[in-house]
Image: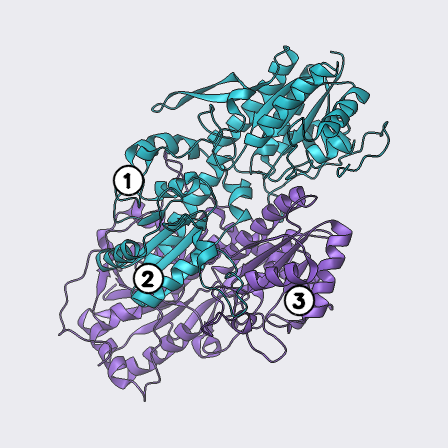
Chain colours: A cyan, B purple
Amino acid sequence: MQGNLLYAQSGGVTAVINASACAVIETARKHKVRVYAARNGIIGALREELIDTSKESASAIAALRHTPGGAFGSCRFKLKSIEQSRPQYERLIDVLRAHDIRWFLYNGGNDSADTANKISQIGKALGHDVKVIGVPKTVDNDLAVTDCCPGFGSVAKYTAVSVLEASLDVASMAESSTKVFVMEVMGRHAGWIAAAAGLAGKSADEAPHIILFPEIPFDEETFLARVKATVDRVGWCTVVVSEGVRNKEGKFLSEVGTRDAFGHAQLGGVAPLLADLVKQKLGYKYHWALPDYLQRSARHIASKTDVEQAYAVGKAGVEYALAGKNAVMPVIVRSSDAPYRWKIEPAPLSKVANHEKKLPKNYISRDGYGITDAARRYLEPLIRGEDPPPYGKDGLPKYVRLKNVAVKQKLPAYSISD
Amino acid sequence: MQGNLLYAQSGGVTAVINASACAVIETARKHKVRVYAARNGIIGALREELIDTSKESASAIAALRHTPGGAFGSCRFKLKSIEQSRPQYERLIDVLRAHDIRWFLYNGGNDSADTANKISQIGKALGHDVKVIGVPKTVDNDLAVTDCCPGFGSVAKYTAVSVLEASLDVASMAESSTKVFVMEVMGRHAGWIAAAAGLAGKSADEAPHIILFPEIPFDEETFLARVKATVDRVGWCTVVVSEGVRNKEGKFLSEVGTRDAFGHAQLGGVAPLLADLVKQKLGYKYHWALPDYLQRSARHIASKTDVEQAYAVGKAGVEYALAGKNAVMPVIVRSSDAPYRWKIEPAPLSKVANHEKKLPKNYISRDGYGITDAARRYLEPLIRGEDPPPYGKDGLPKYVRLKNVAVKQKLPAYSISD
């Protein structure tokens, strides 16, 4: 087919975003369409820093399926409204036109769906016909319309497995050592990842014993009472806390905690704060963990369901684009919990853009510290299955590093602050 | 054979200590010897809280091989010298005698080797013949005589894989977001785990770019210069820091860092301190991770070499005991780096007890921030091979929980503070 396809990654990367990239390139190759990738996301598109993926071998592209991170670079950069930054949109269309780009696939979250939607509109207005497709991705699982988001299943699996393993450790030591273990997980605005931790245990005595959600205001007294009751009953206690947990005034706990002598906020997350609170008020020995990027890049423990869905949305994205669909996103539609069944369907970007899918109220148990059966029915299929990467003789996963050969520039240099 | 065997776990647990337990029980069963396990380590032995492992099925015991944590409980409790706490040693011998225990296998580190050695002596003095065997275990890899310690290879693999994965994440985002990533690893007294992180990269531009060892006094100026040079050259920088890193005065950085308004030490580890230092002095956006117990319990990413060695020392321990050997430890002897060859041999407990194996000076690069080829030759075989646990339909590893049926007590109750 005539014309080229541009693929760009956006926002925080995941363990499986490259599986979507793999699908995009493999599918486009089947249709003899050349794929350019923007270096560092939309920033590279604006700067005309494009990568020619046709320079990569089939095996290198296949290896993207099992390689975490963003193979072409991503960015945190949001285009403003067309009114506010019309020159940026015009520049973008200039770049697309200069490289005969007829299809643009933007792999990201809420903001990216919005940007993709706007690019589609401005292209039409400026007389360059480009089909724009959003490809869903986010560990936060907060995209509207789609049943779940590629990237979430793997961080959910990492989190549940880590809580299970660390809790076996704590259980072994509790008689004479650590009695309370606090693990902090991502999710500043919604408790999806915290909820996934709940999959590690099936009964009240199994870890995690307490989950602190951003959706539930933190109450020190009730929390401490529950920690004590758990230690009294079980002998130890595992707490999973979302980085986004807030006090009754709506302020992040991590920001209103202890301050140092200079009035700076306590460095680091909410896990050490809670652990210290437990020590001060209840006297228990504690440990805490904050896996940070480890959780969203842990391709070695990716969910097979997640990898398959990440691939499926990339593949569908190209198929939609080449079929002439515009301003849509391939979303995951669940038709059954048990057996778990899903399919991919197109949804208008306008329905996805700028909405946020919250954790449903009926996913949090009435006491506010755990998950319900409804949450389990939703979450459990998403962490199902393993898809380990191949390993080398050196004991490490064989993650690919692409050559990322630059496409020759045709336009004058451009500074993003213009 | 006549008599029973007692097995106890000691100190911090690992991803593979239960593989040693599995080997002990499977090997003893082959010889028709009953294995009792001490509940929560030596504390349970003193309290006469014994577990009858003959109540567990063969499949449950086999599953110990892939289950992290300490299946019977462990403890942090060190018996003092015989002069200081003779009643405790006498009580221990009473318990062994009451349950016809002729063989005692103590699975732990330096302290445990010392305790095992003393128990062997006091048994003889008190007329109860018990063969005492130390079984090596520690993520710290600091046991003398043995080439490496079961438990270390798996934490080493977890650490190298995690650094590799998180660094791919950072590399993707560096253009517009996080430029410096700091990951804190265990190892209060020796930099073995920090060194293992170095396996993630093979050249100067690959992560980790900077490793901070407990063996090298921290120098703020040189460190910051190196972070800046790395960001200038590579675009981003991954720092791995041992929890045990100290300043020039020999004080732990984590203890002399920022103090809060009440004079308390800054909560949490050294990673957030360094990350904040980088932000204050160089202005880079940062992230940091502190996996804590996750690193030593990550059975899902265990090293196959490590699992095999953990099993081998447990098996040899029983064979030595039943053959009448006393006060020895099965140690790992390396006969070749490439191809990697190892075997198990007995070593006197007296040679292992109370010694500490330091990271050799020639394993740290001359600039103090990386590892040498000698270190790679030593470390690389230890993380080689994968041995994933079986997974259930729920997407979680199938870790076993034993019934841990108590053996009927025969002696008067005993309080450890006696």
Compared to A40, does A254 lie above or below? below
Chain letter of the residue beneath label 3 in the structure image: B
Q: CA distance from mark 3 to mark 2?
A: 36 Å
Q: Nearer the viewer, residue B41 or B52?
A: B41
Q: Where does the N terminus of chain A fall, quadrant-wise?
A: top right
Q: Residue at x 67, y 71 (%)?
A: B219
Marks 2/1 same chain: yes
- Residue visible at 51% across and 37% down? A139
Q: Which residue is mark 3?
A: B363
* Chain name for mark 1: A
Q: What is the three-letter code of the residue carrying label 3?
A: Tyr
**What residue did someone put label 2 on?**
A179
Labels 2 and 1 touching (C-beta < 8 A): no
- Dot 1 amino acid type: Ser
Look at mark 1 in the image and give the residue it sits on.
Answer: A365
Residue at (43%, 50%) from the top-left corner? A251
SS class, disc 2 = loop
